[in-house]
């Protein structure tokens, strides 16, 4: 029961944050090319670290 009391508010807060982030992203004029380039660069860095074992 105590776990339920602790987990439910956390789930509610995460849900509210996701709703706010999604609404802000829909309103904002986001440069998706830059965002995807950053995500791709980070993914490439992790992949190269996994392949080479360096870093």
Image (cartoon, rainbow, N blue to C red):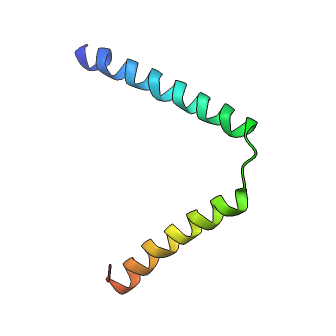
Residue 43, x across and y down, in percent = 51, 69
- Please report the residue visible at 47 percent of the width from the left and 29 percent of the height from the top: 14
24 versus 6 height, above or below? below
- Please report the residue visible at 64 percent of the width from the left and 59 percent of the height from the top: 35
- Which of the image's four quarters has the C terminus? bottom left
Residue 32, x across and y down, in percent = 71, 56
Residue 22, x across and y down, in percent = 65, 35
46 versus 35 height, above or below? below
Q: How many marks?
A: 0
41 versus 6 height, above or below? below
- Please report the residue visible at 52 percent of the width from the left and 29 percent of the height from the top: 17
Q: Residue furthest bottom?
A: 52
4 versus 31 height, above or below? above
Task: In this rendered view, identify the residue nearer to me: 26 or 7.
Answer: 26
- Which of the image's four quarters has the N terminus? top left
Task: In this rendered view, identify the residue nearer to me: 30 or 8.
Answer: 30
- Please report the residue visible at 73 percent of the width from the left and 37 percent of the height from the top: 26
Residue 44, x across and y down, in percent = 51, 75
Which quadrant holds residue 53?
bottom left
């Amino acid at each position: 029961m105590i776990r339920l009391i602790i987990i439910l508010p956390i789930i509610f807060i995460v849900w509210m944050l996701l709703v706010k982030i999604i609404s802000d992203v829909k309103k904002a004029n986001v440069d998706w090319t830059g965002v995807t380039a950053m995500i791709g660069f980070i993914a490439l860095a992790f992949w190269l670290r996994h392949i080479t074992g360096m870093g």
